[in-house]
Amino acid sequence: MTRRSDANAQAGPARAGLGLALALLSAAVALLLGGCDLDLTSLPVSSGTPTRAPATGEPTAEPAGEPTRPPADSSPPPPTVISLTIWTTEAFSPTEAITTGQILAQVVAAFEADHPDLQVEFVLKKPYGKGGMLDYLLTTGAAVPDLLPDLAFVDVDELPAAVQGDVVQPLDDLLPPELAVDLYAFARRGATFDDRLMGLQFQADLDHLVYNTGVLAVPPRSWPGVLSNAGPYIFPAGGQGGLVNDDFLIQYLAVRPWPPLGGPQQGFLDLASLAAVLQFYQDGVTRGVFPAKILEYHDNEACWVDYLAGRAALTHVSARRYMADREQLQSSAVAPIPGINGATSAIGRGWALVLVASDPARQALAVELMARLLEPEVNASWNQAAGTLPTRQSVLATSETEDSYERFIHQQLTAAQPRPRLPNYAQVAAALQNAVQEVVAGTQSPEEAAAELLENQ
């Protein structure tokens, strides 16, 4: 660096002298030319920048102008693949390992074939709890709504929370009208909020009565019929998780239908209706029709074990369990669960397919896939493989089978109702279970337990 600076200092005077000499020479040349009176226009014109002659074999350069552009690519751009996302559980996964999965995979493959620019992606979630389906929908919808799926499978009992969380879209203006009309009434009612259909129930289950035909020639149709038989008659009076289950609700709704004729503003709990159901429990235990350990039954599975072992003449059972064990049964028949004055209406439960996408273009594709998954043939074959019940009336109504159970279950599905939708359901269900325990244990009368329950609500 220092040496380079010294060399520049020494070169300064030399450059100045050379410049002066060139200036004097130029002036002399100008005077000489002027004296010769030359015509400068006869000289060849040259550009200020010398050009290199092209070498042998090298093409001559084109005159300067617009730069030459490469030819445009005439091949079409690759098609954009649309990904349609479905959040699902293992029960509704298109896996080849099980028949239900194969059925779903076939429907999806046909759908993708009709839409070559579309790909359906299933994302597995847990059914319930932290990190479960509802939890993921609500947390994602609140934090990063762009990551929500287009469709999702949701337990119908959790559908109210999904609707309240604003993560599902109404279907009324998007579905083929014949599809919604063909759903069983309980499936439509259970998925309808403020007169808007918010889901399509995909599969169902319900409870009914099974009785030993070797003990009873005719099943009881009402509570008086139950109490006039020897029994034992078992059902899960112990509730689950401290809450009454469907069996109590079925019996209560037989006394007080919901919503009542006067509208839901009348309230779900009614003193006389509660006392009537609790009296039935007390009479059953007192007469020995219900076993003393009736409170030890917390679900229908436990009841079913004792029925198969011959420890009960009548029991409640889910349709799913009955169909799974039906071929092994002997001397057994089915009937509706008895109510205060006749047959009750079962409570339908199950899982629904809901629309999550809010973009109209994605909605159209998602609803088209929903409709295909709910086609009568698909709904019938999938539920038969899963051991559950279809949700479209046309599946069983048009069946040509002579199977008596199929006709019976169609009647049960037609008369079924959804679980009552109460804002404080857990609180009410816990209070009802406490009343049942007090009455069966003999610590309170039916009237006392009913009055205390209402007083504390």
Image (cartoon, rainbow, N blue to C red):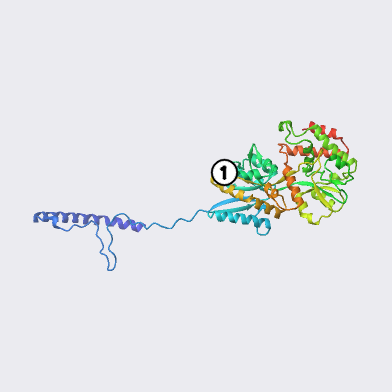
Q: Is residue 72 left or right of residue 262?
A: left
Q: Of helix, strand and loop, which one carries label 1?
A: loop
Whether residue 342 is visible: yes
Residue density around tag 1, few if under 14, some if 14–19, many if 20 or more, within 10 Å: some
Q: 73 or 131, which lies in front?
A: 73
Image quadrant of residue 221? top right
Quarter that holds the C terminus: top right
User: Label 1 is placed on what type of residue?
Assistant: Ser
Residue 383: horizontal and vertical position, in percent? 69, 52
Residue 440: horizontal and vertical position, in percent? 86, 40
Q: Is residue 28 left or right of residue 77?
A: left
Residue 113: horizontal and vertical position, in percent? 56, 56
Image quadrant of residue 179? top right
User: Which residue in the structure is indicated by mark 1?
Assistant: 358
Image quadrant of residue 355? top right
Q: 140 or 449, which lies in front?
A: 449
Whether residue 392 is visible: no
Quarter that holds the N terminus: bottom left
